Amino acid sequence: MHPFTYLRDDDATTAVAHVHDDAHARFLAGGTTLIDLMKLNVETPTRLVDINHVPLTRIEPASGGGLYIGALVTNSDLAYHDAVRTRYPVLSEALLSGATPQLRNMATVGGNLLQRTRCTYFRDAYWPCNKRQPGAGCSAIDGYNHSHAILGTSEQCIATHPSDMCVALVALDAIIHTRGPAGDRTIPIGAFHVAYGEEPARESVLEHGELITAVELPAADFFRRSHYLKVRDRAAFEFALVSVAAALDVHDGQIAAARVALGGVATKPWRSHEAEQMLVGALPGEATYAAAANAALRDARPQKHNGFKIELARRAIVRALTVVEGMA
């Protein structure tokens, strides 16, 4: 681990200034990803700015009837919050499917939004990796890529985004609130993460020194009928091979609105507008869900070892939508 200095700030504006004026500074909240990467010498910040005393830990009603979630709310507190469990069950299920209770007690909403990939070639500094060192190459393309992405990939990177929470937030049309050197702004979550493309080291639209302050969930009654399905190699403390966040609004026997988002298969939390277009206006049922699943995977680009993810994702989409259809 490289040497670094440590600061603790009690307000967001001061914390932003302390990170902005050092190109290698990082915010520190739960540290469940950052500290791991520092131990591996993948992250080498020169300054850590501890924001745990900044007052960003509240969950409260939003002005539009939705929910406003401070960036320092822990994954455990969010998952078990009554409003989340009843109005946004897909989010509660996604959070509880990730990590372990001990990690969920430490990990924060803001940190979860910025999770970095679990690609073994990224986390082992021995291997060339475009995310760690732009222009070095992508070892995963010709390596063992069983867990890697089939959507949103490029010749530069095929790493998957690891978060469960973010997949649910994409399905819920969440809004990210930030504070940066230029002031406050809001970012729709669909525009927050960046598909790796030709610049795989850039993972979000945040500028250096910009701090996530909150996540806002819109008020949509049909989000009560939502579900998160996670398929993985083992039952606990494992990242998704495929995951699906799904929601349906059914009126008079017809699908009026739908949300389908995928995890474990893409370079960012993957909202499938193609699947949603197939669902809206159609009759609920397995044939409709299968057509939506085919649409969602139409542009998949499998690698040598992960072609199985296409069929696995298709089946997971059908199953998730079937579960939602059966919800009261």
Image (spheres, helix red, strand yellow):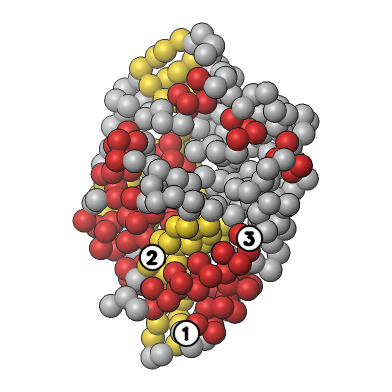
Element type at marker 1?
loop
* Callout 1 amino acid: Gly
Residue at the image position 57 percent from the left and 57 percent from the top: 270
Q: Which disc is residue 285 wearing?
A: 1
* Callout 2 amino acid: His
Q: Report x, y in % for residue 85.
A: 26, 59
| Mark 3 vs 2, N-terminal side | 2
Q: CA distance from mark 1 to mark 3?
A: 24 Å
- Relative to 203, residue 6 above or below: above
Q: CA distance from mark 1 to mark 2?
A: 16 Å
Between residues 284 and 123, which one lies in front from this camera angle?
Answer: 123
Residue density around tag 2, few if under 14, some if 14–19, many if 20 or more, within 10 Å: many
Read off the residue under disc 3: 308
Q: Report x, y in % for residue 300.
A: 69, 61
Read off the residue under disc 2: 227
Residue at the image position 39 percent from the left and 14 percent from the top: 7
